[in-house]
């Protein structure tokens, strides 16, 4: 009768194991937040960078926000390339029917976010130099960062959804499937926090800072290098957690 007043003592072994699974998934989910924050640059700072560039390609004017369409197109190309080339080669070397495990795919995606942001930083440095020289860089030079980020999303985006669904306890699969979308939501708050901190710190001594209204007076390239560093740390942390993660084995399901 005493246990009726302490219901936590009446938990089944299955319930305890389900909680353990959720706790094990949290570190992996934590890195999803910072990965999504890096990916969110496509809808924020990449667009700002594009607006500051020469949007004329031949006789056409290309809106900066439309460069996200290029990412979608390249994602389709990367999906075909992944299924027809990458996965068969990976199967040959790993012996895994999937080619790469979900954790490995997520790792590749996080790794590819690094050169994408580095490419954005290099383009911005080049753009600032071209402005000082009296001309502006073409928006077409943004394509490499979008191409690499599209490849990153192909490896990581779907793998994360599959991972949270496959690893979730049977009674919580719907809830855990939403983990990635929660990470994406929190990523925008993280991005906002980083922007606020950068603006506060870089203008503390009276300068215009890294992110002024006129990007020609700032250093958006430094901001991209900052996110490159954050992505490196995020990849290292993810790798450490992924190596220690034990994939759930379902018996009799």
Image (tube, helix red, strand yellow):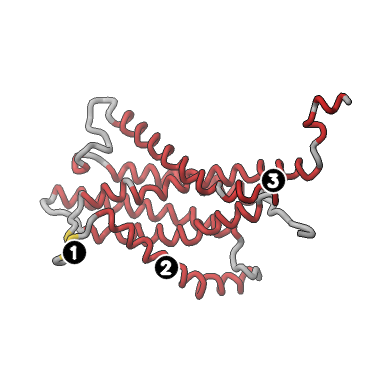
Give the image quarter of residue 193. Answer: top left
First in sequence, mark 3 or 2: give its number.
3
Q: Residues within 10 Å of mark 2 (few under 14, many from 20)?
A: some
Quadrant of the drawing holding the C terminus: bottom right
- In the image, 182: left or right of 127? right
Q: Which mark is residue 186?
A: none
Q: Residue furthest right?
A: 1
Residue nearest the observer in this picture, 92 or 175: 175
**Residue density around tag 3, few if under 14, some if 14–19, many if 20 or more, within 10 Å:** some
Front-lying residue, 53 or 158: 158
Image quadrant where residue 74 sits: bottom left
Residue drawn at (33%, 29%) of the image: 201
Element marked by disc 3 = helix
Mark 2 vs mark 1, CA separation in Å: 23 Å
Q: Please provide percent x and percent y for residue 6.
A: 80, 27
Where is mark 3, residue-wise? 21
Q: Rate crowding at label 1 as few (under 14), some (14 to 19) or many (20 or more) other CA atoms within 10 Å.
A: few
Q: Position of residue 234 (x, y in %)?
A: 50, 45
Marks 1 and 2: in contact by CB < 8 Å?
no
Q: Which residue is mark 2?
A: 76
- Residue 96, percent from left and from top: 65, 68
Q: Measured from the top left, where is residue 109 in percent x and y?
A: 49, 56
Cα gap from disc 3 to disc 2, whole angstroms: 33 Å
User: For mark 1, what is the residue?
Assistant: 57
């Amino acid at each position: 009768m005493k246990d009726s007043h302490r219901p936590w003592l009446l938990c089944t072994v299955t319930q305890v194991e389900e909680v353990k699974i959720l706790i094990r998934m949290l570190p992996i989910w934590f890195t999803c937040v910072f990965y999504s924050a890096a990916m969110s640059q496509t809808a924020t700072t990449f667009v700002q960078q594009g607006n500051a560039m020469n949007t004329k390609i031949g006789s056409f004017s290309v809106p900066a926000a439309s460069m996200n369409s290029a990412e979608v197109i390249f994602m389709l190309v990367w999906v075909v390339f992944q299924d027809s080339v990458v996965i068969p080669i990976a199967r040959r070397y790993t012996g895994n029917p999937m080619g790469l495990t979900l954790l490995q795919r997520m790792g590749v995606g996080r790794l590819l976010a690094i050169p994408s942001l580095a490419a954005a930083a290099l383009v911005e440095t080049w753009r600032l130099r071209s402005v000082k020289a009296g001309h502006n860089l073409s928006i077409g030079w943004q394509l490499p960062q979008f191409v690499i980020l599209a490849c990153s999303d192909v490896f990581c985006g779907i793998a994360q959804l599959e991972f949270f669904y496959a690893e979730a306890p049977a009674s919580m699969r719907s809830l855990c499937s939403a983990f990635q979308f929660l990470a994406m939501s929190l990523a925008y708050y993280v991005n906002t926090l980083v922007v606020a901190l950068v603006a506060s710190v870089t203008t503390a001594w009276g300068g215009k800072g890294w992110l002024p209204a006129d990007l020609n007076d700032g250093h958006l390239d430094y901001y991209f290098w900052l996110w490159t560093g954050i992505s490196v740390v995020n990849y290292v942390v993810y790798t450490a957690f992924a190596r220690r993660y034990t994939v759930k084995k379902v018996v009799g399901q």
